[in-house]
Image (tube, helix red, strand yellow):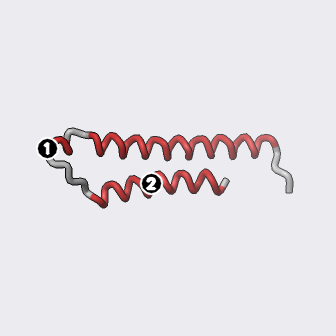
Amino acid sequence: MKATKAELQSALVEAQRNAALAFQNLEDLKEYLLSPKFHSDPTVQTSDVLRRIEDAKCNLLETLVL
């Protein structure tokens, strides 16, 4: 079955949205790691970092599935 132009456009918009969310997730992780919280104590909560990475991965996977 061939996709219509509207369906392709919708899929493109959804893929762009998911990619933007993944990018934002990674930017949030970067901000978290560079936050003042770590200036005096450089230890990181592994679970926080892993959760943020998983969020970004989920957004990227949704983009690839389209």
- Mark 2: few, some, or many residues within 10 Å (few <14, many ≥20)? some
Residue to which mark 1 is pinned: 40
* Label 2: which secondary element: helix
Q: Quadrant of residue 28?
A: top left
Work out which quarter of the rendered image holds the N terminus and state it. Answer: bottom right
24 left or right of 38 in image:
right
Q: Residue at x 56, y 44 (%)?
A: 19
* Label 1: which secondary element: helix
Q: Position of residue 13 (x, y in %)?
A: 65, 40
Q: Position of residue 41 (x, y in %)?
A: 15, 48
| Callout 1 touching callout 2 (CB < 8 Å) | no
**Is 49 drawn above or below residue 6 in the view shown?**
below
Eye-nearest disc, 1 or 2:
1
Amino acid identity at mark 1: Ser
Outermost residue, right direction?
A: 1
Q: Residue at x 58, y 54 (%)?
A: 62
Q: Quadrant of residue 33?
A: top left
Amino acid identity at mark 2: Asp
Residue to which mark 2 is pinned: 55
